Image (spheres, rainbow, N blue to C red):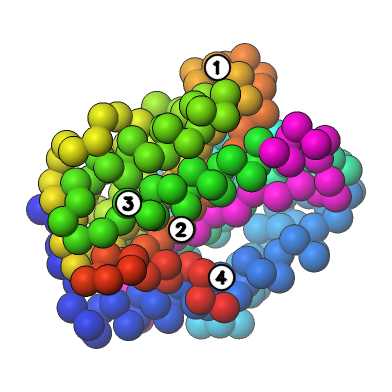
Amino acid sequence: MITIKNKAAIAKMEEAGRFLSQIFSLAPAIVRPGMSTLDIDVWMEEKQREYGLTSKMKGYKGYKHVSCISVNDVVVHGIPSKMVILQQGDLIKVDVCVAWKEYCADMARAFFVGQGTEQQEKFVAVAYEALDAGIAQAYAGNHLSDISAAIQNKVEKAGFGVVRDFAGHGIGKRMHEEPEILNFGKPGKGPVLRAGMALALEPMITMGSHKIKIMSDGWTAKTADGSLAAHVEDTIVITDTEPKIITRIV
Ligand code: MF3
Ligand code: CO
């Protein structure tokens, strides 16, 4: 069942999203070559405490951190580690899910330590464009897979791959609720979108093959061919007019 959130629930989700996007707006400036991905997670945890947010990741299926930090060919679910030292030109994806008064916001951003090559920067731009193309379909009356198809279309037209093994999701009091939101598929399928549905859209894209492999830690998902991967995520609420992007209210 896809829950319809009432005004009070949406207000709490918006607050969660506002705080989370404020934290994210500060993140690129603190990231430096020589820093570990664990350093970023520790910073994230401190910021969440400052804002009074609860982590929805720490403790989830035994996960021990407040963020996933995925570097270069790691697509998603990179475990923060003091052994992973960032270098100039690395592409990092930071994924965080928090709650405010029990309601969640889920967000991920991809950015370079310094700068990427022109081709790499273009690749990351396509991830953001795909997310926006998905959001542009998130209207009451549309079908769920209109979002999926728009994301796939944007990515594949640009010549990149769409990861099949993970998906976006409904969100509310729980980080993962129904429905599952694939990043590929034909339009016009699945449930009809209604005002009050809250969705986390999260395209995961690769420069090469869309195939991935899971590392022996059971979390880290890497591209099978070692190609660069990008992942971005926003939490949105369907309304009677424009979708409300709660992780972009700064
Ligand atoms: N936030 C991720 C998502 O977008 C989930 C991360 S898994 C966790 O669905 F264990 F790290 F929380
Ligand atoms: Co998510």
Mark 2 to mark 4 CA distance (whole Å): 10 Å
Q: Secondary structure at mark 3?
A: loop
Of the residues tagged 4 and 3, which is closer to the observer? 3
- Residue at 39% x, 48% y: name it: 134
Residue 218 shows up from this direction: no
Is there CB contact under 8 Å for labels 4 and 3?
no
Relative to 233, residue 235 above or below: below
Disc 1 target residue: 209
Q: Which residues are magenta?
A: 98-122
First in residue order: circle 3 vs circle 2: 3
Residue 116: image x %, image y %?
A: 81, 40
Residue type at numbered disc 4: Ser
Marks 1 and 4, how far apart in space? 31 Å
46 falls in the magenta region:
no
Circle 2 residue: 234
> Is residue 23 something one can see in this rendering?
yes
Which residue is depicted at the point 48% across and 68% down?
247
Is residue 107 a member of the stretch shown in magenta?
Answer: yes
Q: Position of residue 63 (x, y in %)?
A: 48, 48
Residue visible at 64% across and 45% down in the picture: 125
Tell me whether circle 1 and circle 4 mark residues in contact (CB < 8 Å).
no
What residue would you read off at disc 4? 21
Q: Earlier in the sequence, mark 1 or mark 2?
A: 1
Kind of residue indicated by mark 3: Gln
Note whether 140 is above or below 248 in the view shown: above
